[in-house]
Image (cartoon, helix red, strand yellow):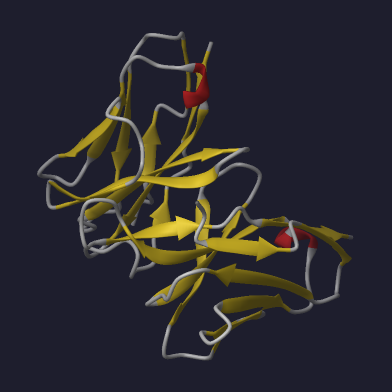
Amino acid sequence: SQQGEEDPQALSIQEGENATMNCSYKTSINNLQWYRQNSGRGLVHLILIRSNEREKHSGRLRVTLDTSKKSSSLLITASRAADTASYFCATDARGSGGSNYKLTFGKGTLLTVNP
Amino acid sequence: KAGVTQTPRYLIKTRGQQVTLSCSPISGHRSVSWYQQTPGQGLQFLFEYFSETQRNKGNFPGRFSGRQFSNSRSEMNVSTLELGDSALYLCASSPGGGAAYNEQFFGPGTRLTVL
């Protein structure tokens, strides 16, 4: 089963608007990552936030983490058509048969930014 | 630095055949992870290799196997292909071990179609 679940599944906005995507997860984590994927291609890492951090910024991106609610949000400000992509959150979870953690992805939010 | 490369980019096979996919990580990266992406199941972790050792594995049948060479290049093999194995197979690398703790650099993927 997925560790992280993004909400909403799809989001359509106009250029210049802000976009907010949410991620909820089930078990405690060490860190949470956000990735972007354009049209079924490889993923691009956006931000990694550790469990002892509450907020992180990178350019037009702002990520928050609330470990008490087991949730995170990704805010993209002043969106552009080029931001059109699927956005995934990923958390660490124990792999089968061992103590090593694996990266577990949610099913993603499809963001469409209309020019 | 060159990015993560995957070969081939597209592959068409028939049920029952086997397939080998290749991944060359970014120079200096010792960790390589593999993921399967399908519309229904999303992104699912297959396995992670670090210094030629499998560190972690996901919940896939034994038909899925992999290995890593001394130069960190990795291959994954799927035997006795089934229709449900049709997917985008993504490889990711990171400098150190522990894919769940570090930014992952993804390749463009191999699109496998099983007929």
Q: Is residue B84 above or below residue B6?
A: above
Toward the viewer: B47 or A41? B47
Toward the viewer: A9 or A40? A9
Q: Among all residues in the image, which is located at the extreme left?
A: B70
Measured as percent of width and height from the top left, residue A87 is found at 63, 60
For residue B68, side relative to residue B114 (left or right): left
Q: Is residue B51 above or below residue B83?
A: below
Measured as percent of width and height from the top left, residue B82 is found at 45, 17
- Residue B53 visible in the current orientation: yes
The residue lying at 22 percent from left, 51 percent from top is: A97
For residue B36, side relative to residue A20 (left or right): left
Measured as percent of width and height from the top left, residue A47 is found at 50, 74
Q: Is residue A93 above or below residue A47?
A: above
**Hey, which quadrant is residue B23 in on the image?**
top left
**Hey, which quadrant is residue B64 in on the image?**
top left
The residue lying at 59 percent from left, 77 percent from top is: A71
For residue A24, side relative to residue B89 (left or right): right
The residue lying at 31 percent from left, 18 percent from top is: B79
Q: Quadrant of the N terminus of chain B?
A: bottom left
The residue lying at 36 percent from left, 42 percent from top is: B59
**Hey, which quadrant is residue B97 in on the image?**
bottom left
- Residue A57 visible in the current orientation: no
Numbered label tally: 0
Measured as percent of width and height from the top left, residue B9 is found at 46, 29
